Amino acid sequence: MIQRPRGTRDFTPEEMETRRYYEAMMRSACVSHGFREVQTPIFEHTELFTTKSGPGIIEEIYAFKDKGDRDICLRPELTASVIRFFVNDLTNYPRPLKMFYYGPCFRYERPQAGRYREFYQFGAEAIGSPTPEMDAEVIGLAASILERTGLKDYRIRVGHIGLLKGMLRTAGVEGDQALPILQKLDKKMYDEARTLMEAAGMSIESAERVIAMTKVTGPIEVLKDFEGEARTYLEEVFEILGHYGFRNLEVDLGVVRGLAYYTGMVFEVDAPKLGAEKQICGGGSYSLSELFGGEKVFSTGFAIGFDRTLLALEKEGVAPKRFRVKAYVVPVNEGTRKKAYEITAMLRREGVSADMDLMRRNMGKNFKYADAAGVENVIIVGEKEIETNSVNVRDMSTGEQILVPIEGLVARLK
Amino acid sequence: MIQRPRGTRDFTPEEMETRRYYEAMMRSACVSHGFREVQTPIFEHTELFTTKSGPGIIEEIYAFKDKGDRDICLRPELTASVIRFFVNDLTNYPRPLKMFYYGPCFRYERPQAGRYREFYQFGAEAIGSPTPEMDAEVIGLAASILERTGLKDYRIRVGHIGLLKGMLRTAGVEGDQALPILQKLDKKMYDEARTLMEAAGMSIESAERVIAMTKVTGPIEVLKDFEGEARTYLEEVFEILGHYGFRNLEVDLGVVRGLAYYTGMVFEVDAPKLGAEKQICGGGSYSLSELFGGEKVFSTGFAIGFDRTLLALEKEGVAPKRFRVKAYVVPVNEGTRKKAYEITAMLRREGVSADMDLMRRNMGKNFKYADAAGVENVIIVGEKEIETNSVNVRDMSTGEQILVPIEGLVARLK
C-alpha cells in the first residue's frame, strides 16, 4: 500500500468541514478589518529564505534543485513571500496596504504531536508607517480572529524589542553582537545569554538587569519604571486596543522573537491548554523589504498556527455543527425514478443539498445507507403520491413521516 | 530583486477576490450534490504517480529526494492522491463515497500562455458501483459547477472507451498493445495510430473503421448504428442527465483519454473561446485503487482546470462584483479619535468591513486615500456631531453627505 509522506496529513470530509469553517471565519474577520487576501507560490527560490533567515535555514526546509538546476524550496512560512510579492508588484497600491494569507507551509523536522512537516498558516501583513495605530490594528486583527473562532482561553503577550536592544546598547553591545544574545533570551536560555553578555564585555550587574527585564510581565503599568520611546509607544498601543474593546492582553518583555528584522513591538499568543507547544500566534513590526531589493518600508504582521488553533478549540470542546445532507431522494420503483431525478435537480438548484440512490438499492438498504451517511431527511417518491404532486418526507432523527407537496419541498427543507 | 519562480504566479487582492468567489461557488455546487471535500498533501511519494502513469511522468514533474533520501514529488494532479487516501483510510465510509477537492498542482513544463508550472485544479471522485446513475451524477456535477459560475459557451462531450477497445479487440488487438494506439487516437495523431494498428496486424479497413469511429460526434442518436453494452450504457447516462435538466451535451467518440485505468465512460468539456487550449475539464470512470494496493472499486471523477475556467469566464466578460471596504472612519481631530476607534470596532463586530486612518493623515489626504482605495463611504467623526451621538457619512460614489445617528449606522451600511 502506498502511504502518504511522513509528517503530512490527509483530511477526511469531517476534518475538512471543520477546517473550512474556521478558515472562512478567519477570512471574514480579515475582510471586516479591511485586510485583503493575497496568494503566493507553494515553492520559492531558496535565496528568499536564506536572505531573510540566514543559510542555517536550509537544514530545516525542503530545499532541492529543479530540472533547470535552480535552487528552490517549499516555503517554510509566508511573510518572506508576501514581502517579496510586495517588492515585485504591489508598491503602487495605496498605503497602508493590509494583506492576509492562508496556506500550507513546510518544514523538514522530526514529526511529533502537533508538529507536522506540512502545516497551515493564517497570517496578515500591513505595510505603511510605524505608528502605534498600525501595530494596534494588527494585534487587534489577531485578537478578533481568535475571538471569532470561539476560543476562550488565550493570552496576548506584547513586548518591545527596543527596550532590550536599548539596554544592551547602553552596555555597549549592539548589532551582530546583540543578535545571538537576543536569540538565547528568546528561548529563555539564561545561562547561555549570560555567557554571551559577559563575553561581550558586559558587567555581571548589567547582564542580570537584562535578564530581569525579560521577566517583566503584567498589565501595562509594569512599564512605569522604564523610560523612553518604547514605553510610550507600547502605552499608546495598549490605549488604542482598549478603545477597540480588547482586554485580554498583557505586557511580556520576554517576548523577543530572535530574528534580526524585528524592529519594535513584538507579540505572541498562547493557548495554555495546549501545554508545552502552546504558542498559536506570533508577530511584530519588522523591516524586510530592503533585504529583497525593495525600498525600506515599515511593516507589522503575524502568523497564526492554524492547526494548533484548531487543536486548542478542540481541547476547549468548541466544535462546529456537523454538516449533514438535507435530502436523500429514493424512488419506490423504476416508474418513479424520472420524477426522483427531477426532484433532486430542483433541490440542488435551490441550494438544498440532495443525494439520490445511485446504487440501485432496494428500499430497506436505502434507509440503512441514509442512516449510516447521516442524512437529515429521506424523500420517498411513491407512485400514488406523485399523482397528487406530493412526496413522503421522513425525518431521520425523529422517524416522523409526512406527506409534502413537491412545490413546498424546498421551503420545508431549507 | 528576488523574483518568484518561473511559471508560478502571485495573486493580487483583486485576483484573489475573483478566485475565492468562484472557488466558493464551485464548493457550494459540490455540497448541494452531497459531495464532501477532502484534502491531501502537496507532495507525495513519487511512486504514487509512476504507479499510476508510468515512469515517463518523472520527466514532467517536480521530483526530488528529501533529506531522508526518499523520492518525493510535488503532485501533478489529485486523483491519485485521493484514491490513495481512500485506500489508506476511507474504505469503511458508506458508499457511494462522493468526494471533491481543490488545490495547487505542479508540472515541470515550458511555461506558455495559460499554462503554468503551478496551477489549480478543482475536481471530484465518486467511489461506488459502475452504474449509469453514478456516471450521470458526476457529469452532472461538472455541468452544475460550470453552470453556477455563469459560463455560457461550453460543450460537454461524452464518449465511451469501451466502444474503441471493443473494435480493437474484435480485430485482435488488446491490453498493452491497444494502449499506445488509444494514446495516438486521443491526440488525434491518425497517421501514427494507423501505423501502430497495421503493425499490430490489423487490416487497413479495420484501422480506418477505428479512426472513423473516433470522428463520430453529435446527439445521442448518432450511436444508433452501434451495438452492445457501451451504447446502451451511454443512452442511459444521457437519459438521466436529461431528467436532471442538462441539455448541453453531445456524444464524441474521439474523447479517448489515453490512460490505461479508464474503463468506460469518458468526457471532456471545452470552452471554445479559449482557442487552442480550450479544454477546461476532463474525466471518466476508472479503476485505480487496486494499483495502490487496495480492493478494486469502480470510480468516476473529473478535474476542472480552475485557471482556464476563470480565463474562459473573463473572455465571456463575466466578472464578480469588486469588493470595496464599506466604511473608512476618520476622526476630525485627536479629540474624536477615541470615538472613531469605538465606531470602527462596532462596525467590524457587526460584520461591516471598516477601516480607520492608521497613518495620522489630515482630512484632505484621508479623502484622497479613501478614493484611491475604493472605499464606499467615509464616516467623519466630528466634535459637534458626537455630542448628539451622530456622524457624517459621505457616499464616495455620489459625493452626498448625510448625518446619521451612530445607533443607526450598522443598519445603514449593511
Image (cartoon, coloured by chain):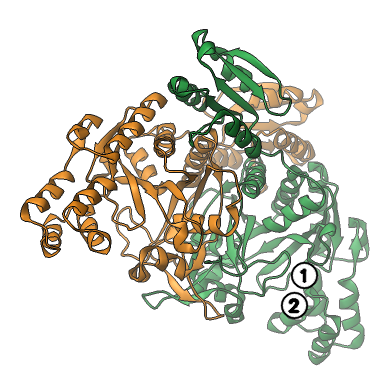
Chain colours: A orange, B green
Quarter of the view holding residue B334: top left
Closer to the camera in the image, B58 or B259: B58
Count the marks: 2
Q: Considering only vertical position in the picture, is A402 above or below B297?
A: above
Residue sitting at 24 percent across and 40 percent down?
A: A252
Determine crowd level at label 1: few under 14, some 14-19, many 20+ residues with C-alpha closer than 10 A.
many
Chain assignment, label 1: B
Q: Position of residue A98 (x, y in %)?
A: 52, 43
Q: Considering only vertical position in the picture, is B359 above or below B342?
A: below
Q: Are marks 1 and 2 in contact (CB under 8 Å)?
A: yes
Residue sitting at 20 percent across and 58 percent down?
A: A173
Which mark, residue A348? Answer: none
In the image: residue A267, left or right of residue B116:
left
The C terminus of chain B, quarter of image: top right
In the image: residue A63, left or right of residue A277:
right
Q: Position of residue A100 (x, y in %)?
A: 51, 46
Closer to the camera in the image, B112 or B35: B112
Give the residue type at disc 1.
Answer: Val
Closer to the camera in the image, A286 or A309: A286
- Residue, disc 1: B256
Q: CA distance from mark 1 to mark 2?
A: 8 Å
Chain assignment, label 2: B
Q: Position of residue A103 (x, y in %)?
A: 49, 53
- Residue, disc 2: B183
In the rendered image, is residue B352 in sight?
no
Q: Position of residue A82 (x, y in %)?
A: 50, 55
In the image: residue B386, left or right of residue A359:
left
